[in-house]
Image (cartoon, coloured by chain):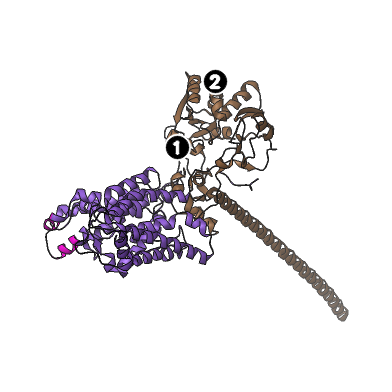
Amino acid sequence: MKLNLSRRSEVRTLIMNGGECEPYLTCDDRLMRERAAKIVEGIRIIRHATGAAEVMVGIEDNKPEAIESMMAAAQGTEVRVVAVPAMYPMGSEKQLIQVLTGQEVPAGGRAADIGVLVHNVGTAYAVRDAIRFGRPLVSRIVTVSGGAVGAPGNLEVPIGTLASDLVRACGGLRGTPARLVLGGPMMGMQVSGLDVPIVKGSSGVLALTHAEVEQTQPGPCIRCSSCVRACPMGLLPLEMAARIRIGDPVGSVDWGLKDCIACGSCSYVCPAHIPLVHWFNHAKGELAARERLKLKNEATKRLADERNGRMERIAREREEAARQRAAKKAAAEAAKKAAAEAAKQAEEVA
Amino acid sequence: MTPLAHSPHAHAQVSVGQVMATVMLALTPATLFGFWLYGWPAINVWLVSLGVALLAESVTLRIMGRPIKAALMDGSALLTAWLLALSLPPWAPWWLAAVGSLFAIVIAKQIFGGLGQNLFNPAMAARVMLLISFPLEMTSWIGAVPITSLAAPGFVDGLAITFAGTAPADGISSATLLGQVKTDLGRGIGLDQILAGLYHPDAMAWGQRAGSLGETSALLLLAGGGVLIWRRIITWHIPVAMLAGVVVPAFLASLIDPAHAPGPLYHLLSGGVILGAFFIATDPVSSPNAASGQLVFGLGCGLLTWIIRTWGGYPEGVAFAVMLMNAATPVIDRYLKPRIYGRDRKGVALTPAKESGK
């Protein structure tokens, strides 16, 4: 999808995302350390396909080995490896673009609007396999981690493998985990069991302990603005939450709800442990539901209006037809009468 | 298995209680210094404030049917009372501290909806109420009588001063520098003459002066403020802006009219400017959210303090200034928001820059 679009929108800069999406996850790190040459090959294929003039690989500066091996592999090519600060959410497209190019993606727009295309290093690796060997995406590297995992590590597994098999391969569970998560700790999804398959977007399987989850009862907001300072999008999470709390999701849009990328930073730092992102996603869902309801109502109204129109037309036509029939009948009768009259006159004349 | 929870699935090791505890820890050096400087009566005032605040908090929560233990454990009532105590005259009678704490907790905080809902800083609201209602008691200052000195009252005498209203011995009661300067300026005495025997900047920086229980030691309060910034409980914006709001007009005025307008150092070291800048104005609940708003808020607090001190009826203006700016906070928050990524300051989406020649 992204590759098709790029031809049309004239991509000038190709950015390869070597910033790990989230803490805990290390699958991209390992990939870059061990298979740098293959990644660079994939990057050059993508560059060729998009016609981008400039190629940058942004890697967080807490991964010196990955930076080193990628630099070595990129030697003598047009690919430039850049170290970026390791500050969550650096793996987010918008933040990475801002750091590397100094430009911002317009609100509601795509990266391509400012001539930038972002791909993950994992994608480059898969593209190389697909183009060079015709090997489709049938496997991926997954991080298995968390305090409740026996021997955390990265595994390359066929897509469709059960998460429970991954955990078993990593030394199994130590005790009962407080939470099982697919994806990363900041944006991943909690699952109730591990009998779920790995899909192409699964970056991690986490089994977190109570200490890691640090879940407590939420308290009242003290307006400390920690969330404001943490928000990478420049939003006011506390104001948005205050409006959602009183049942006014529309009001929270005025404070930037639609710009929220749900990165989880605000919830993470909140000293009152308010589940801010939970509220934002609830409000987004609520707004979407209202939008759907509005569309449905409009559609219903349109159909009803059309039906009313149709019924009216039919009634009108019926009336018309009846009138015409009556007129015809009257005319026929008049003609008959006239004929009779004429005959009578003729008789009289005769 | 816990019920399904939304991401994030990790949390920083922070809590409201921790925040409050850190602030109280940062206040401790200045408070201990106040205890040493003013002796047992000061300790009594502090204890009464805190005790009454806890009592008031639990009673109001009980009436409202809210959980009591969690609210008491978060330390917010203690901190409010602590700040109030620091802003009272050190030898104040017990009922002054008690009424102040009751007002701060019941009227300024819980009636507005409890923690996080109060429009005004509870400690300052209580201080202003006391100052207006009991001007005599609120301006009965004493000079420094370190607890180790002979003139200091012992434990029993201290109890008598706080609870029985025994008047301090003559020679101990004293005026604050701000009060003295204000009165004498009113009498038409020149500034250099007034300050000649009274004003010792180095002693004032340490806190050896008449004043509120915990407002006097600029250096210890500054150290506490530094801890708060280092621990990221507060940011530099409000304190720096508030100090600038005092220093800049004071400096300009002292250039224009040195005979009547004291310089910036005098303003910084007297009254409650340092305590106000680092501990009072930075109260998160009643100050703005965005950095730009905080700068405006701080500047307003400082400027109003200086204006009230210079032209107002009261010698000190920190409490009034903070309350006035508290009232302006919702307006500031409405107009000064952080810029949203991908949008301009007005919230309109950026238009991609069209690159020419490509």
What amino acid type is highlighted by mark number 1?
Gln
The quadrant in which the C terminus of chain A is found is bottom right
Q: Label 1: chain?
A: A
Which element carries disc 1, helix, strand or loop? helix
Assess disc 1: are there few (<14), some (14-19) or many (≥20) residues with their C-alpha within 10 Å of its C-alpha.
some
Q: Which residue is under mark 2?
A: A37
Q: Earlier in the sequence, mark 1 or mark 2?
A: 2
What amino acid type is highlighted by mark number 2?
Ala
Image colour assigned to chain A: brown
Left or right for B61, reference A301: left
Residue A158 placement: quadrant: top right
User: What residue sits 29% from the left and 62% below the top?
Assistant: B157
Q: Position of residue B236 (x, y in %)?
A: 34, 46
Q: Residue furthest top?
A: A76
Which element carries disc 2, helix, strand or loop? helix
Q: Which residue is under mark 1?
A: A98
Disc sitting over residue A245 in the figure: none
User: What residue sits 51% from the left and 44% below the top?
Assistant: A268
Q: In this view of the protein, which residue sits in the foreground, A236 or A107?
A: A236
Residue B191 drawn in magenta: yes
Q: In this view of the protein, which residue sits in the foreground, A54 or A161?
A: A161
Image colour assigned to chain B: purple
- The answer for how far apart the CA atoms under marks 1 and 2 are is 27 Å
Residue A135 placement: quadrant: top right
Q: In this view of the protein, which residue sits in the foreground, A26 or B113?
A: B113
Residue B18 shows in this picture: yes
Q: Position of residue B257 (x, y in %)?
A: 14, 56
Instruction: Determine the main secondary structure of the stretch shown in magenta.
Output: helix
